[in-house]
Image (spheres, coloured by chain):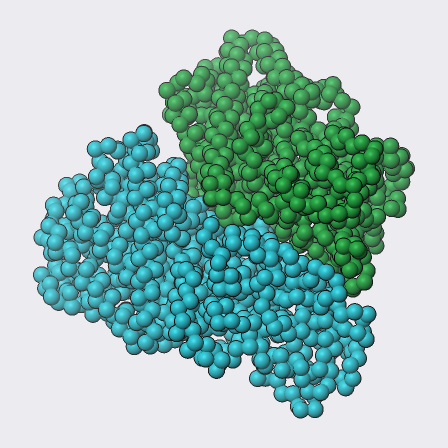
Chain colours: A cyan, B green
Amino acid sequence: MDGEGSSNHIGGMNDLENEGFLDGKEIERYWSEISEKSMIMYKEPLLTKRMNTTSQIAIVGANVCSIESLDYEIVENELFKQDWRSRKKAQIFQYVVLKWALALLIGLGTGLVGFFNNIAVENIAGFKLLLTSDFMSQKKYFKAFAAYASCNIGLAAAAAALCAFIAPAAAGSGIPEVKAYLNGIDAHSILAPSTLFVKIFGSILGVSAGFVVGKEGPMVHTGACIASLLGQGGSRKYHLTWSWLKYFKNDQDRRDLITCGAAAGVAAAFRAPVGGVLFALEEAASWWRSALLWRTFFTTAVVAIVLRAFIEYCWTGKCGLFGQGGLIMYDVSAATETYGVPDILAVLFLGVIGGIFGSLYNYLVDKVLRTYSIINEKGARSKILLVVTICILTTCCSFGLPWFSKCIACPADLAVTCSTESGNFKRFQCQSGYYNDLASLFLNTNDDAIRNLFSTSTRHEFRISSLFIFFAAIYCLGIITYGIAVPSGLFIPVILAGACYGRLVGRLFASISKLDTGLFALLGAASFLGGTMRMTVSLCVILLELTNDLLLLPLVMLVLLVSKTVADSFNKGVYDQIVKLKGLPYMEAHAEPYMKHLAARDVVSGPLVTFSGIEKVGNIMHALRTTGHNGFPVIDEPPFTDAPELCGLVLRSHLLVLLKGKSFSRNQVHCGGEILRKYAALDFAKAGSGKGVKLEDLNIEEEEMEMYVDLHPITNASPYTVVETMSLAKAAILFRQVGLRHMCVVPKSQGRPPIVGILTRHDFMPEHILGLYPHLSPHK
Amino acid sequence: MDGEGSSNHIGGMNDLENEGFLDGKEIERYWSEISEKSMIMYKEPLLTKRMNTTSQIAIVGANVCSIESLDYEIVENELFKQDWRSRKKAQIFQYVVLKWALALLIGLGTGLVGFFNNIAVENIAGFKLLLTSDFMSQKKYFKAFAAYASCNIGLAAAAAALCAFIAPAAAGSGIPEVKAYLNGIDAHSILAPSTLFVKIFGSILGVSAGFVVGKEGPMVHTGACIASLLGQGGSRKYHLTWSWLKYFKNDQDRRDLITCGAAAGVAAAFRAPVGGVLFALEEAASWWRSALLWRTFFTTAVVAIVLRAFIEYCWTGKCGLFGQGGLIMYDVSAATETYGVPDILAVLFLGVIGGIFGSLYNYLVDKVLRTYSIINEKGARSKILLVVTICILTTCCSFGLPWFSKCIACPADLAVTCSTESGNFKRFQCQSGYYNDLASLFLNTNDDAIRNLFSTSTRHEFRISSLFIFFAAIYCLGIITYGIAVPSGLFIPVILAGACYGRLVGRLFASISKLDTGLFALLGAASFLGGTMRMTVSLCVILLELTNDLLLLPLVMLVLLVSKTVADSFNKGVYDQIVKLKGLPYMEAHAEPYMKHLAARDVVSGPLVTFSGIEKVGNIMHALRTTGHNGFPVIDEPPFTDAPELCGLVLRSHLLVLLKGKSFSRNQVHCGGEILRKYAALDFAKAGSGKGVKLEDLNIEEEEMEMYVDLHPITNASPYTVVETMSLAKAAILFRQVGLRHMCVVPKSQGRPPIVGILTRHDFMPEHILGLYPHLSPHK
């Protein structure tokens, strides 16, 4: 292990399957060594020099959290085969029923949370805004500001406190974490029950506090958490467990559930069931099966039905200030449907500039996150302080900037809804019959502000100067808000800024294009979303479901294509960027070009720890204690075979269970039959996060250390193998397509030891490879 | 090779990679052997006893067509590596630009064809219907029938002649063939230029002839054909070739293009760009990458824009009888939006019964196809005769049945459009001011009939008895029409029958449910589609894009979920059924349960033909002549290595190119360097179907037979290998996920020959496995 290779190494992943040999003290020693060098190859992840972390706050380096790879391989050991073959029809039926029942529960749960979230935000923020406008209409301007500011700060501080003290992993959007989980990266805190709790309430408080944040990202994370909680059979910590979920004790079934959860989250946030399915497919999931489409669709259908039922209930006026609005659903169907060449040109222009703004947004968010990391690193108090600071800034903007706008007379034909507490036109400081256009945007919930911007046939409702001020303010506030310790979605800030930008462009092109300004606002939002998120079909469908007008489809498609193409030439999508920034070892679907120049054997790192088919307990205990490996090759040696041959791969978790059971023998003999009788395959099934047997739980006597244990029953006899001369690119594609955790590299020629090494996720990370071979170019 | 194993074998696949040894005479001998036995294990594919075929007519056993597997593996031989590493930025840029340019061209081409198709059908069928109704209004009933019937028979005979003589593969829907191609099954005729030609014109003629067929399936096939033609660099046969497409000379890039083509087809047929993408994803494609979503989306966006531009042009009245209609777009937005518990119950009932009718449809289509196979087998003339018979039957139904309906007085408020030549209400034999409701459905294009059924606020337009007659007639005609020798889509018959069924249910439940009958018709169509096609999200989106009303989403989702679930408990989806019926060796994404009981070594079949690293030309020629294998393991033997070791796998196509170049040497020495200088990787790139070097093209002298050729430069040094003890289920999942053609099975222990056998697609087919192990149960 030379310094350079292993330093990047640690940056890449804490709990390495195939390197290890790092206990706490060693890591500290590395720290001091590494911090002296500057060994950054190219644009470094934020955590290159630190341990890897997985929470949004952890971005900031404060919370170190160990991560592991998920394992989607079929572990074909004797125990498993016995179970696999003997599974009865009734059990298969139970599994299928449970699968659908869980999808139903995820849909119900996420739908309920989505509705609860909306009703809470509408009521809290509604109360706050009513109070403020009451004072304003009484001309008590200072009192109004005091009330508004104190509400905001109180809510923000509460949200920050929840995040800082209970679940730091709940901060931020959550989509990058879900994306990483679905790529096979597991960290306990990502989907823990505490994260779920904070995500729900933190999001409500944060959105109510008037931050420029959305509830969409958090809803996705919430959906994933609900799915994880259900799939793990509840939480042992909180004494909520269901034992009949035994068939879901594997990573593959959990992954499917969490994919459903992510889709349900989007469906609940936007009331966009088809959009939710497509989001899960396009952005969230790394592996996808046709069967999953069907189940995800069912989940989002349940969400849609739950939401619809509750909204119909609320139409009767029993939900407080919820009223007709709440769950976003904008109507731009009054917009004109025909367009000509000048319109298309205007839209193309809008798309190009929107793409540039979008990629600039990503660039600035990245910078801000890196800056905040230094502040947040200092502890919970500084986290809360940062949140309160941003809150005060936001409050000042939203209350202060409207004063720059002059009062406008209400349009004659709309006098009914103008200048009242609700609706498009806010009175603010103006006299009756007049409205303040900036206040109509700032002093509103984000949902209502978007509704105002999308409103059709209201070309002159907002002055160009007001739109410009609002755009600048929201664009900057959106950037500086993401990264503080509250659950904060990125969709709404981007839609807000984009809609305002689109309306501006619409006003500027008024002489050329006859398209409605509301439609321009929608296209502006699409261009910003395309420029930041870089999704295509899912964004398109979400926008169409939001606005309920399919005739806009060609225009929205065009804008998304243009803005994504433009933005892609500058940088990566915002979620990919955050995943990278956090140092999460994300496996891309394609191999990097420099991998073509390397063979599999070039990156396996040693020393390799192997076991005999019948191994001494002491040796196993030593290996488990001194390495962090999660998989060990098992080699059958003479006298049991003629020559050493690869028997298979044994997993750390299985070894721990076997050692705990103490099925030892005094001599080196086969005793697999006994083990097969003693254990069922379910004893070795993957427990929920943090629930498995740990090394500390073992209590092996000194004399037992000299005894032998037969590893054959728990050895995966057919691990995926590649020959050492296979190019790394080909190996990476195999690794990713099959969803592996360990891949055995075997020698080309006979007569050598039967295994050369093991490739894990970490060995495919650019930081590792380029650390070993610095002369390779990371660029295409 | 025992009789039983190999008999199923031949049924499964003609051009076997790993079995071979069957030349024409041997096959004939097998025929006679086999036909004497009855060795059908369980529900047999239609072609168990025959050679495998791939065209719709071939279902019928008449056209025998050899099929091969596609190969998505990265062939890592020395030549390829040299090329891979030396590829310059300019070349990569050229590749990317071409990729998008091809997507654009596919979109443009498919859009144009879609529009042309519509305009042709509207004009031909419009002329025919005008002529008929002219005669009818003059009370010349017999003349009207003669005109109508002769038009229909003429058009049908022309369509059948095209199909029977030029391209038998163009008959039928085409979706099963495209699905099979995207699963990795290649047959030359599936996507040949002649198929494209017949598909376009045959579909126009067939639809115009008044058959109960749609143009949607054929459009998907057309899109795929256009993509294939572009991706192969044109057709050498027709002197249309582009040489700059060299980077697309591999199966993976072609697969991507054809996926785009399939999506473009749906987009053009239904004007549903998002639905097209989802269709490609859910139904057509077997492998999917996120990047493909983006490109497919671009293609369908181009289609949508092309169609829109042409339709706007046609609004000016320059497209003959095309008018406002043509491309289907139904509007049910006037339907009520609120619904209660009784409505939901009615919808659930509709879904359940719709699912049953749907699965019955599949069952009957299967039976009819098997019956027609006997007729179609007899040659082109009997094919045409069958088409004309069905045409006469259809004509009699559509002209005769309306006489059973009484004239209805035109509704007072709709008198303008009633009883004229166009519009909802057809006069038929009635006097002015009256209309015949059955004629309004029968004597119309299918698109207009669906529009009539979907029309809202017209509860009493059609009498229950008329709806019942129409439903029965269309349901039966739809079933007996599929399988005749014309391009025939399944969507439109199913939608027609379903819409009629839905309207019937709506009328029957009128006292319970307040939902509009037009909405019921839509839901009925959804239930039938769900019951036959078994798609979910894509159908849902296609229906929403057709009707342009997103508020129907929850109801459509509910119906689709119910009907698919109900129908799934009876049989498979109609496309899967047809794929199976044709004997296409489709690889499912999941492993069958009985595969768990077998290991990889249990199904490899011998004898295995291997080559030395430096092999005698005569041996290679012998192996190529006597076997049909497409991949041969290459083994390095002493004195070049210490022990025999697996060098890799060499492909038949590469061997043929190498032998044609005659880079031979007199002695058994390495001469790889020379070959590397002489050839470029592109010389070995996969040529378009039917364009590669053939065994007959080789002209090896007798003395050259004794010379040696170095196979190392063209040997794939890192084929995917599995250990012989891996369960067949795990091997099948790997094979399918990575998209392989050959998978090497290596021995567990050392000291044995370095390869046990090769697994190919065929070895995973149930017919093969259950032939070898008849005691295994094929059921779950």
Residue closest to the eye, B319 or A109: B319
Whether B77 is drawn above or below A190: the answer is above
Query: Number of marks in the image?
Result: 0
Image quarter where the C terminus of chain B lies is bottom right
Question: Based on the displayed image, in which of its 4 quarters is residue A138 positioned?
Answer: bottom left
Tell me: A38 left or right of B161: left
Residue at 41% across / 29% down in the picture? B308
User: Residue B496, image x and y in percent?
Assistant: 56, 32
Residue closest to the eye, A626 or B520: A626
Whether A724 is drawn above or below B197: the answer is below
Tell me: B249 left or right of A192: right
Residue at 57% across / 26% down in the picture? B241
Whether B759 is drawn above or below A350: the answer is below
User: Residue B217, image x and y in percent?
Assistant: 58, 33
Residue at 73% across / 21% down in the picture? B380
Question: Based on the displayed image, in which of its 4 quarters is residue B389 positioned?
Answer: top right
Residue closest to the eye, A753 or A215: A753
* Outermost residue to the bottom: A702
Whether A284 is drawn above or below B62: the answer is below
User: Residue B183, image x and y in percent?
Assistant: 64, 43
Tell me: A553 left or right of B95: left
Residue closest to the eye, B479 or A487: A487
Residue B528 appears in the rendering:
no
Residue at 66% across / 24% down in the picture? B167
User: Residue B413, image x and y in percent?
Assistant: 38, 25
